[in-house]
Image (cartoon, rainbow, N blue to C red):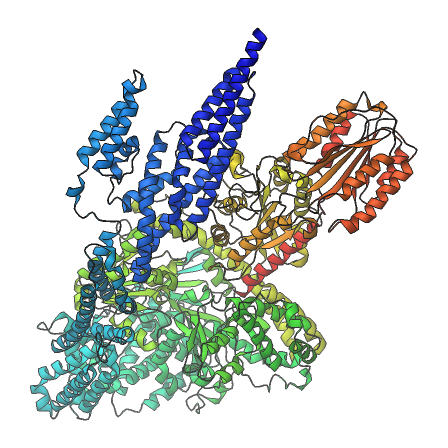
Amino acid sequence: TSRTTYENKVRKFHINALDQSSRGTKALENSNYCMLQDCIDILDLTDRHLGKHIPIASRESESLKKRALGVFIDICKKAHVLLESDNRNAIEKIFRDYRDSVLYLPFITASDEGKKAFHLTNQLMHDAIAKDISDLKQFMESFDFAKFRSKVISTREFGGFLADHCTLLYERVKTSEHVEADQWLDAIFNLCYEHFSQCRSLNLIEYFAILDILPSSNQRDIEKAYRSLSKRYHPDKTGKNDSTMFRKVKEAHDYLIENIKVEGERGDVERPFDAKIKGIRTMLREGVKSLFERQQYDKLGTLLFRLDDLKMLDDLVVPSLNHTNIIDEIKELIQGYVKQARVDVDSNWSSRDYRALNENISDLKEMEKHLKAYPDIYSSSWNSGIVLKVEKEIEELGLRACSYLSSHISAKENRDNFRRCFLDMGHVLVELPFFKDITKSVMCDVLESCLVHDWGYSFLFEFGLCLQRGDESESEIDSQVAQLIVAEFSHFKEVLTMVWNEETSQKPAEDTVHSIRGQYRKGESMGELQIERDGLLESFQSFEAQYKKLLGEYINPNADVKALIQKTAAIANKLKPLSCDSGWNEEVKGQIPYILAGVFTIFTVRRSGESYNRLSDNSEMSTKMLMKPHNIQVLTLLSLFGCGSPSSISLDSQLMQIRTGEGKSMILGAAAVVLALLGFKARCVCYSEYLSERDFGLFRDVFDDFKIMEYVKYSKITTLSEDNTKAKGDIRALTENLLYGKLERVASASTAKISQTSVASSTGDIVVAGSTVGTNAADGVVEFDVVSKSTNDCLSDDILSLDRTEILLVDEVDVFFGSEFYGQTYNQVAQLKEPEITDILNHIWIANKRGERKQRLADIRALPAYSHLLTKFDGFKYILDSEISLMIDQVRRVDEEPYYLDRNTDRIGYKVMDSISYEVTYGYRTVFAYLQEADKGNLKESDKALASALFIPLSCGQFSYANISPKRILGVSGTLSALGKYEHEVLAKYVVDTFMYVPSVYGESNFQFDKGGDGIRIETNVSNYHHSITDQIQLMTKQKRSVVVFFQNNARLKDFTSSSFYHKLGRQKKLLTEDMPKSDKDFVISKAATAGQVTLSTAIFGRGTDFFCKDETVQKNGGVHVIQTFLSDEESEEIQIQGRTSRQGKKGSYQMILLNSDLEEQFGLARDWTDDNAKKDWYNCLSDARKKRRNAVCEEIETNLAAAIEKDCNTHCYFDALLAKDKEVASDIFSEIYTSFKKGSLTSIDLELAFIIDITGSMAPYADATVTTIEHMLSGTGSILSKLKINFPEIEFHLRVGVMGFRDIDDGPDQFLEKSTNEGSHFVDSDAFSLSFVESILGSPSGGGDVAEDLLGAIDRSATWSGPDDWTSLIKFMLLFTDAPAHGFSVNAPNIDNYSVRHPSGLTTDRVSDSLIKSDIDLFICSFNPAATSRTEEELAMKYLGHKDNHEQREITAIPMIPKTQSQSEGALGGHEKHIIFVLDQSGSMSDDWSGVVAAYNGYITRLRQNQRYSDLVSVVQFDSAAMVTVEKKSISNVPSALGYGGRGTSFLPAAARACALAMSTPSTHTPSIVFMSDGEAGDANEAATRFSQLNNSFQGHIANANELDLNVIAFGSGASHEQLKKIASSSRNGKFQMSADTAELSNIFVQIADKGQVVNLLEAEIGKRISDAVSDRLALEYVR
């Protein structure tokens, strides 16, 4: 019958489906994936056409696919393990299965799981081979041949396998219809093509893929494959008309046969890295050559140490490497270089090539340090007698030179021989620094021996003049040396004076007077100053006549100079008394020229009178050697004293511009003398102590002659206010006694000994020590500060009795605007030294040294030393706590500020301006630096040094540097024309409103700066920047010019010297840095302006350093060329740097080479600004950008000044209380000012806060809590700003907020949700806007898939926001809200982590930490599942804390949003797993609503699935008059959707009993949660409530970490007994009663319950507190910097 026929056919197809399934299973077991896919295809075909009749076909197909996918995943996991092990070559055993699964089973890569596993495996293969290749390069470069051998062997095998198999897979994937291209396979192919093409033809890979053979196949393999495939695809065999595949096979065969040589023709085919190994001889030879050229002798030492390991490479190549020959050759080569250096020493000594000889000696000394362990290479000491040779030669030259001076006749006859001897010694002096001391000593002896003869002075003068002027027959280097000799020895000072006089073009005074112009400030405008030119000229003529007269009289050696001193003083005495405000009438101004004439006569006589008289027989020449003021200097002085303003009767403040290098020192020295004679004190201030000392020396003799030393002081401007404080009393000693409770014992201020040192405050501010009047140099006082105690016999008694007014004399107006002065304070520091303090410092240091966790204040409070200190400093606990907190912070930053140890004195110093100051400290960083040096054994007298250094440096006063009130300010500067509006306003505060501009004594300048051409170069990257600097240096040195390059700071200089370009400059280059000894600085400066010399300097030497060019070769070719590699913040600095060339009328040029990124970052120029502006306008653009930046800086300075003034005022109030011995008032004020010191000077702080929020489905239960937390953080009394305002009331905080929501990697374009402004910035000022966005992204959390989330991707994306206003604030926070671990940090369980091995973008915790540190961001991880996120937190925290650039040792903060005890264990991720027990009333009254109840129940299950709560369990108890369990502990994915219906009466107790039994059977990994719903009432309600109450009690003892039972009771409809149901709800404190009118409302209640987790809401105050603490830490760092 038809029915029977149908059943038979169904049975037949059913059996056939089972057969195909069985065949597929066997195929899978046998790894026959092609057959497996055929079986699946047949099953799918059966299902497609007969599925209705043969349902088993679909089931069996899906079963096969599922098992095959599982096998593939297992293969991938095995591969992952192997690839991250040392046995990666074992992957070969499973690769075939891996490849065939992908190529033959389309469903593998069609599934997300299979696709991810495929990509990840390829990524790991790529990373493994890439690392191998990188390691090979590193091992070879470091000459680690042992590791190189091992790595070559393993890499050949692994790389060869990949080159054969992965490249073939790569090509097959390209032509596959079902496998998407993979970037990692592409990268593997490129690496294989580059490194493993030997023995295989990868360029023909497409043909090998057609034949399905490896690219290393030979012709026999090709023929074999062809025969097999041609049969398979021959049209006669296939029975098809399509011969496409057959033709492809034929084409591939023919092409390969034609292009691949037969095996015998290939010869010895190389293997991967053969070329590198065979080329090792050449590589080592070139390497040795390069190392010698770069003087990298330490690496040569490493090579020699490892050279014998070369034997390990012998068998890696065919023929054998023959290591013995290579080793011998390399050793011989190195030995040859060493020998050549020794030969060069002798050769260069013989040829007297001193420059090359110096290089040889330097090289040999370094070689000895690193190669002396190899006597066959370096056999003896570096000097090998050269020291004796040179010293002997010097002594012989000295004796020979002296022999020529036996008589005047001999000296004349042997003048040329004497010159040659002296030049030969000069070459050694200049070119061989190692012999400088002995050479200079011998040369001095020769010169002194000449001076014993009465003809000696004239002979030396003529000889010096001859050296200075040069000889046409001499070489250029001889001329350079001759001029350097003249500059080096004081015996030739007359020559330098004469040359200076000859080069100074004395323009007629009339011309100069008419060229002087002046300005005065009136209100906001500048007006032209009216100069009485006739009166000024008349005053000059009076001076000139008197000076000539006096000089003619007193230049005579027999003249009574003391008489002139007294006469000059007498003129001044007659004018007394004088004040600044009156008395400067015509009579006084008429006498000024005569006083000046007397002063300059004394100056000239003292500086050059002796030389003049020795050479008086040559009146013309001797006159030129007199050191006299030139017209412009005199006119400047006369103008300063008002001789050009006859109508004024006061001494007015004014500044005068005179070009750099034109004698400002002489002007200020003479002005100081005149002022002192007229009854004033003169304070000369300049940029640095080095320059101050130099200038003081010029007039020292004159100060002594007039006995005015105590009325003249030279110093930096900062010392002026320091001295004012000293005059008031010793605040340091008074403070110490206050703290010790001994204030009453202190002597009065008038009798207290003033001996104090200003050092850095305990907040770490830089403070330079002031000098102390009346102490010696050992006390840290510059010698010229010492007061003369000699009798003032030239000053009248009435003058001595005057309370002298101090006049400020300024050398360069920049001193007012320097970073150390205006708006800054200096701190007085009391030193608290106690044994307990030493103990605490040692304790903190040792804990840090051991790498222990950061110490806390509580740790120190527990020490006995702390308790003892509290007793000693009763009432000052707040000080101890604050200082200890600073100790704890600064111990980790000891090396943050580079310091210098003077091993002779065991003192630590820091760079200040152009020198190292040992009077500067950086708070506890300096204290711990001493402990660090002690640990290293670098202190000579460790105990003594530490006893001096270990103390609490306690700030006891901050005085404003700018709080000075000199009666008048007079000065000279080279940069008045560069002053802007702000600078004029500052000067106006000091009542300086008159400015005069004087022409140059040298006439028109020869300075060249091509602003519109090559004078400005802008480079786009660091490499081009360094290349451009090098090119310009080489261009200039080829022209036999000298080059001085100024870098912004030491770091930028180091960047250049560390680059490859530095070595291209050759050997004639010198560095000039602050930490060099003075003698070395002087040597470098003296050579800087000689032909071919390159000097690389920091910017500090761009002011005041005299690179005076005496080299005619340099002058002839254009002079000194200056390159500035940065744009100065101030135009005045730029002018000063320009002034290092073209000095004193010489030629010179200047050029800027700038890095565009610097201009973008520091001056706000757009990246493409050069494209938008013509080159001729570049300088104007730079100037405009600088002015804009300067305006912002000026505003900041004014803010700082206001704060400094306030501190100064408070400190003086405290000082007055101390002097009055008012302990109570002093203590109160000290507490206030000490606290304010700790707060620093910041008044406004910008703060950025980024909320990075996990918005995947699992966060749904925490959405409301997250929104509420963020809302409270941003607004209200508990907000971040409110709390910060409480903690830091004096600081105004500006908060900007950024928000980003993130999902997981597989969520594609929906992964990141963020908003930015039109300008592209992610941070906004609007809290409302931010909160609205937070609410919108948390409105419907979704996505995620697995449990782990892309935390690393979210953090990295936010940290690298690059909008114009992103991450620009001082303090930056990122708050990450999540409930899941990051990929790679979860347990290995199903559906937990799809990217557990490697992030698909290559992100790691190292990279993410690097992004955070680079942007200076503090990260908070706010976790709703602390147990799940703990590994992520720990790993990130470890990488962040250990980051090389995390100098401040900041830490990531983890904030548990619920207690960890309430989150799940490591083994149960994804939320707080629950066992939900539904207790549903199915009594008869529910008949009409039961379908709605089931729908609500399904809605609950759906929401749990959306929330990714796949680990939750569900049970259902249905009850009427009885109760039954219809669903028991089913996972969310397996919960049935249909529920049956009963329909009888209502009893609560049976339902309660069933529910309680289920609750007690809850697994330990879960927490029970009961949902009890009824629409009626029952007689056993009380018993049911009792049963739930008993459950609650036993629940807490039975369930681990449980609190109260989670019980939700719902009254459904109008018939429910609220009273009974409320009683049941009250059985637990967590019980909740709710009412539902209908099924729709019931559904909403169920969904709400599904969204509710056991989230213990952490108070937002906790997050606020953590942020406040972090802000405190960051502020502390800002204050101590």
Q: Nearer the viewer, residue 1577 or 1117?
A: 1577
Determine the residue located farthest toward the right in the rendered image. Answer: 1579
Q: Quadrant of the N terminus?
A: top right
Instruction: Out of 872 and 1459, give the one closest to the viewer.
Output: 1459
At horizontal 81% and vertical 20% (from top left) the residue drawn is: 1488
- Residue at far left of view: 413
Image x and y of residue 1271, in percent: 67, 43
Q: Is residue 1660 left or right of residue 897?
A: right
Q: Residue 1571, position in %: x, y? A: 78, 36
Quadrant in the rendering for residue 828: bottom right
Kindly give the residue lying farthest to the top in the view shown. 1
Q: Is residue 616 visible?
A: no
Q: As rendered, which of 675 and 1098 lies closer to the eye?
A: 1098
Q: Is residue 903 above or below residue 1336?
A: below
Residue 627 appears left or right of 1048: left
205 relative to 952, above or below: above
Residue 1407 x %, y %: 47, 51
Residue 31 visible somewhere in the drawing:
yes
* Left-right relation of 1379 to 533: right
Q: Classify residue 174 by image quadrant.
A: top left
Q: Residue at x 32, y 89 (%)?
A: 561
Q: Nearer the viewer, residue 1190 or 1474?
A: 1474
Q: Position of residue 600 (x, y in %)?
A: 32, 80
Is residue 909 toward the left or the right of residue 515 in the image?
Answer: right
Q: How many marks are shown on the rendered structure?
A: 0
